[in-house]
Amino acid sequence: MEGTKNIIKKELTRVFTDKKLVISLFILPGVLIMVMYSIMGGLISDLEKDIEAHIPSVYIQNAPENLETTIDALDYIADITYLNLADSTDYIKDGILKGDVDLLVVFDEEFTGTIQSYKEIGDPIPEIRTFYNPSEDYSNAARNNFTATVLYTYQQSLLAERLGNIEQLQVFYIDRDPDAGVIVDESKASGKFLAMLLPFLINIMLFQGAMGLGMDSITGEKERGTLASMLLSPIKRSEIVFGKLVSLGILTSISAVIYTISVVIGIQRLGGGSMGMMTSIKFTPLQIVQLFVMLIVLVYLYVAMVALVAVYARTQKEAGTYVTPLYILVMLGSIMTMFSSGGDKAIQYYAIPIYNGSIAMQDLLVGELSMLNFGVTVGTLALIALLITTLITKAFNSERVMFNA
Amino acid sequence: MIKIKELTKIYKLTKKQMMEKKTKKNMMKAVDNLSLRAKSGEIYGLLGPNGAGKTTALRCTATLLKPTNGEISVMGYDTVKDSEDVRKRIGFLTNEIKLDPQFSPKYMFSFFGRLHGLDDKTIEERREKLFDYFGIKDFEDKKIDELSSGMKQKASIAVSLVHNPEVIIFDEPTNGLDIVTARSVTDYLRLLRDEGKTVIISTHIMTEAEKLCDRIGIIINGVLVMEGTLSEILEETKTKDLEDAFFELYKKHSKEEE
């Protein structure tokens, strides 16, 4: 294994002594991910602030006399125009469509009279109709705010008038202190949220890292004629392959860690608060070992997949074309966890390569990964990885693949 | 000692290669029933035009390609069955195999030394000797990418000799080199021969073959058409120099081929 050790050392030296490579592989993507999420977070926050600062333009037709008093008593800010029943509302609706007006509220004819003449069940109940544009953020917010703030309060005041004492409507309370009744495993709850997101992110980041490095390390070396010089040394081809794969695995893991940290920091800036959730997840020593083993096997598998494609490609451009379907396959396999919750899956699902890595990771995050499922997952992934390694070694022994002969 | 016995190498062509070569055959015989012996303490020169099969024959000898038919042994080891043993004993150089441009000649020398199982002290001693001879010391720490083609070739030669091989297989070693660098390379090959090593080179430079090689094999269309010392070849072809002899043989065997 001395040859493998020397190749690993050389590959790591090659990357870490090249400033441009370090910047382009590790630093730049990490910074870009953080910047991207920060910009997205900033834009979302600006949008929320903008909606909050916007004074909605509200038209109210046939408003009851006491509505204005209710509005004045509330902390409700809007540019309100009151209309008579006979006034046309067409130009207002047109304004809502164009985004110039945010909300039109229409009270039924004889609104107050109908309410006052209500005696028993079956008597007519008047309607308040709201006209707004759901595709316009201002209009949507104006409608929600008006309904929750003005109309709810107004309804309560009318009920109080009708019944004399509104408290009589209250038969029982449900959770006056909602927080006191919550019984939750913080770790599991946080894990459940992250379990939807993290397997996908980890898989994608690992594969991206393997892609960036693997194609240069194998196809690039083949293209430059530097791989052949290694084939002339008196070591087994399998030692060269193993050396390449292990070094790529180490580099991919480093890049995946950097990318994942960048994503987590980025999401935090986006306002998701995932960092807090991360810290509330608690793993048992067994789970940590399981996660570690699973990540090692996954890294090796992805590196081997990329290496297999890279070794058959004649140019890096060709390798890039070949690796794209594999990337889509990995995305497909890992995106499914975003639409399902952990646990409760038949054992055969844990034998589907790539997908099994995602669901096992998901189960682990919610604390529902059984030893059997873990074993099947790791076993399948390791078997596939070994099979691919054998194919790569065969390719390294093939003069047609290595020398286009 | 190198023994090549009835070596035939056939390449299977892809459709693209068939189109490029304008042929309907999906097989190409690069080397046809070639037999030769290169002895210890001699420089054997394989002379032939481009595409004659020189590089293929040398690549088979260096274990990079497997013969379709025939056998090759290097210092008694079979190139197919004992390929690792063969690789331990050869120093191979060809234009298509390069050193990693990101590293310095010094790093590459140590790296390949370690791959050959040498200890640090031996690597240091070998580096001192070879870098000094080829004048590599001045640029030993520079990235290979930043070196001139002559400097790169010198570094490649030194690296190929890191393990002090008993057999030296150099494919067109002076190709593209200036006269001074080319001279240092040929002088070193003479030195290696005088140390009792087996040296086999391919070349299409007639004067180089005349001056350097103890025996010459002329290869045309994959076939070894003549072999011998310079005087034997000149006598056989009834010509005055190697260039005339080569053209005489080339005309004759091209016609036969047609």
Image (cartoon, coloured by chain):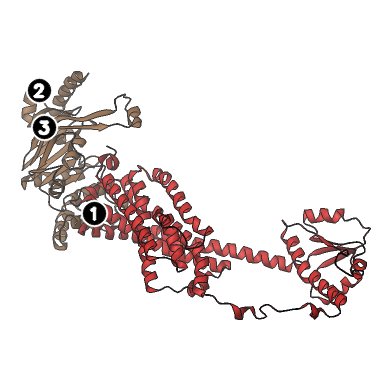
Q: Which chain is brown?
A: B
The type of residue carrying mark 1 is Glu
Q: Nearer the viewer, mark 1 or mark 3?
A: 1
* Residue B139 found in image quarter: bottom left
Report whether residue A24 is seen.
no
* Residue A46 found in image quarter: bottom right
Q: Which residue is mark 2?
A: B237
Position of B90 compared to A333: left or right? Answer: left
* Chain letter for the residue marked with disc 1 in the picture: A
Q: Which residue is mark 1?
A: A239
Determine the CA span between mark 2 and mark 1: 50 Å
State the SS at label 3. strand
Q: Give the percent coordinates (x, y) of residue B72.
A: 12, 38
The answer to whether marks 3 and 2 sit on the same chain is yes
Q: Which residue is mark 3?
A: B35
Q: Give the percent coordinates (x, y) of residue A193.
A: 53, 66
Report whether residue A124 is seen.
yes
